[in-house]
Image: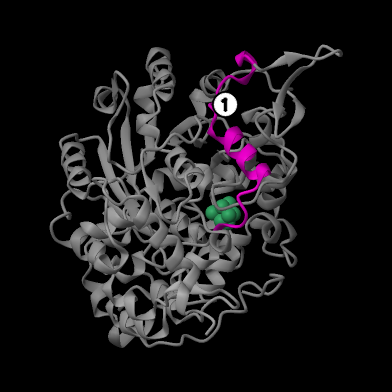
């Protein structure tokens, strides 16, 4: 797809690889390995939609017909489904179903989307954002119109998916579409919502279709993952403050950035009640934020706003930091149970799955009260690999918690990892583990390419290491695409070594002590000690 987007879907480039002949591994894969997104025959610039709308429906209508058998059929000419599958429209169901706010309080289309710079939880209610925002309505309008040529809003707010599909043939959009187009009950709702919007130009919801992704409980986290942006982890911030920081990798640790950390770290569920909120001379509530006074126009707590929307909520995803250790979020769960809505709601966590308790609360006490619970575990290595990359975690503990989850009929555990500079050297072990030891515990496997910080992307590995890895990812063309990409221009991997070795030094003598070249010995020959550089 071109950057300026007008030619979708005609920019599909010729397939570079003959998957028909060599993709035997993909054909034999168990369902849990591919239903979360991976395993398609897409390549950079060529999204393959063969796996969309293929799951036979398990549900029947009152006449005994499978629910996909609408009249007209869901894939009849002119339906949203047909146009999406045939790439006549660049359709994503997320703008029609998901309400997302970033850890800084800005609303955006999803975790991969961009904020509009105007709407945040201090000035806009959750419902207002979902229904009235120009950004979301602009994206929606372009996504249902087969005559759309410019995709101005898509290019502005969905840049990451556009660029991921160009580079890898796979994106958050393609993963979501693969999952949701094969869930006939859910797709029925998406189809109805998109059609209503197309006909009226207005967005609203009157049934359980919305996923609320709440990222307002701050960034308390128990791990120090080497690739994680510091705003998402209090432990990362602590370790950075104590010296493990590299300007070339992360940019300057400026005063402004430190202030930003203070803002993102705080709980934002009920800001109006915070002790530093004051009434100004105009009678407006204001809060000090990044050294400025910011007016609070959205005064209702995030918990109350969530409860207001509860009749329309299909799922709630709690994102941290590490959500399972955040005591305050259990108050929301208690209120959803009290309200009677919990039994209709899927509860989802983006979790490192190393802890299952926050104070006196245990997630296992809550699981039976919700319709389903999904643990989306950030796993991109096994054994000492993950213990190095996601420092302070224990692989045995993750496996133990997976086994505990497997005891509940209404719990799904998914792996969702990041393919990055370090993880790509061992990610095939995760794939193998999921197909062997973990096969009965894992419901879906998915992954995304690390985007930021750019120095930690997989394509920055030394060429020989990348060449040796490519055959290990036969059947996973998006990872092969990442490994085929050249290193970022002007970036020096010695900076990555310096950063990782500084972290090793920081942890020396602790129970988390590990050394880069013991875990990844293939890297050692590329390291130039500081005193030997520039000679
Ligand atoms: S296209 Fe991508 S960025 Fe845009 S809403 Fe869908 S998943 Fe999010």
Q: Is residue 194 above or below residue 427?
A: above
Q: Quadrant of ligand 1?
A: bottom right
Q: Nearer the viewer, residue 461 or 143?
A: 461
- Name the residue: 60% across, 50% down: 253
Q: Position of residue 137 (x, y in %)?
A: 70, 45
Q: Position of residue 424 (x, y in %)?
A: 35, 69
Residue nearest the observer in this picture, 290 or 47: 290
For disc 1, the marked residue is 268
- Residue 273 in magenta? yes
Expressed as whole percent of the image width and height from the top left, the position of residue 172 reads 49, 57
343 lies left or right of 104: left
Marks counted in the figure total 1
Residue in the picture at 49% in, 42% down: 237
Q: Which residues are magenta?
A: 250-275
Q: Secondary structure at mark 1?
A: loop
Residue at 49 percent of width and 47 percent of height: 240
Observer able to see residue 15:
yes
Can residue 77 be seen from the camera position used here?
A: no
Rate crowding at label 1 as few (under 14), some (14 to 19) or many (20 or more) other CA atoms within 10 Å. Answer: many
Q: Is residue 394 above or below residue 158?
A: above
**Horizontally, is 329 left or right of 520 in the view?**
right
Let me know if residue 204 is in the magenta part. Answer: no
Q: Considering depth in this image, is 79 or 90 the residue closer to the camera?
A: 90
Residue 309, percent from left and from top: 54, 25
């Amino acid at each position: 797809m071109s950057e300026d987007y007008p030619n979708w879907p005609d920019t599909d480039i010729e397939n570079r690889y003959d998957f028909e002949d060599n993709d035997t591994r993909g054909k034999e894969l168990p369902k849990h390995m591919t239903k979360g997104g991976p395993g398609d025959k897409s390549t950079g610039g060529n999204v393959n939609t063969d796996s969309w709308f293929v799951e036979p429906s398990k549900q029947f209508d009152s006449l005994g017909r499978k629910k996909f058998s609408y009249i007209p059929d869901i894939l009849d000419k002119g339906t949203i489904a047909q146009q999406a599958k045939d790439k006549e429209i660049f359709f994503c169901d997320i703008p029609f179903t998901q309400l997302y706010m970033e850890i800084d309080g800005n609303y955006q289309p999803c975790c991969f989307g961009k904020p509009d710079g105007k709407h945040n939880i201090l000035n806009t209610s959750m419902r207002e954002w979902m229904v009235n925002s120009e950004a979301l309505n602009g994206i929606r309008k372009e996504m249902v119109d087969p005559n759309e040529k410019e995709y101005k809003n898509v290019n502005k707010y969905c840049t990451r998916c556009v660029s991921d599909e160009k580079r890898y043939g796979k994106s958050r959009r393609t993963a979501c579409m693969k999952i949701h187009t094969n869930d006939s009950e859910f797709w029925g709702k998406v189809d109805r919502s998109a059609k209503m919007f197309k006909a009226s130009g207005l967005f609203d919801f009157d049934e359980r279709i919305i996923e609320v992704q709440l990222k307002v409980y701050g960034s308390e986290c128990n791990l120090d993952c080497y690739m994680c942006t510091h705003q998402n982890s209090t432990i990362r911030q602590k370790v950075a403050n104590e010296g493990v920081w590299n300007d070339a990798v992360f940019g300057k640790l400026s005063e402004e950035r430190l202030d930003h950390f203070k803002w993102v770290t705080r709980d934002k569920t009920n800001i109006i009640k915070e002790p530093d909120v004051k009434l100004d001379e105009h009678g407006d509530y204001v809060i000090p934020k990044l050294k400025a006074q910011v007016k609070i126009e959205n005064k209702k707590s995030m918990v109350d706003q969530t409860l207001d929307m509860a009749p329309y909520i299909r799922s709630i995803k709690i994102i941290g930091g590490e959500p399972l250790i955040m005591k305050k979020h259990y108050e929301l769960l208690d209120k959803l149970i009290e309200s009677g809505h919990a039994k209709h709601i899927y509860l989802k966590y983006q979790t490192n799955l190393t802890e299952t308790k926050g104070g006196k609360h245990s997630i296992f006490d809550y699981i039976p009260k919700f319709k389903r619970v999904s643990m989306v575990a950030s796993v991109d290595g096994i054994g000492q690999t993950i213990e190095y990359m996601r420092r302070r975690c224990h692989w045995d503990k993750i496996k133990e918690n997976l086994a505990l989850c497997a005891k509940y009929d209404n719990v799904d555990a998914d792996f969702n990892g990041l393919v990055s500079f370090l993880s790509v050297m061992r990610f095939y072990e995760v794939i193998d583990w999921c197909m062997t030891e973990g096969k009965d515990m894992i419901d879906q496997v998915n992954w995304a390419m690390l985007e930021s910080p750019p120095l930690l992307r997989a394509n920055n590995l030394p060429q020989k290491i990348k060449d040796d890895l490519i055959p290990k990812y036969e059947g996973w063309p998006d990872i092969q695409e990442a490994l085929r990409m050249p290193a970022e221009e002007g970036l020096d991997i010695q900076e990555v070594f310096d950063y990782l070795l500084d972290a090793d030094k920081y942890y020396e003598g602790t129970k988390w002590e590990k050394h880069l070249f013991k875990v990844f010995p293939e890297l050692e020959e590329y390291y130039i000690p500081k005193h030997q550089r520039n000679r």
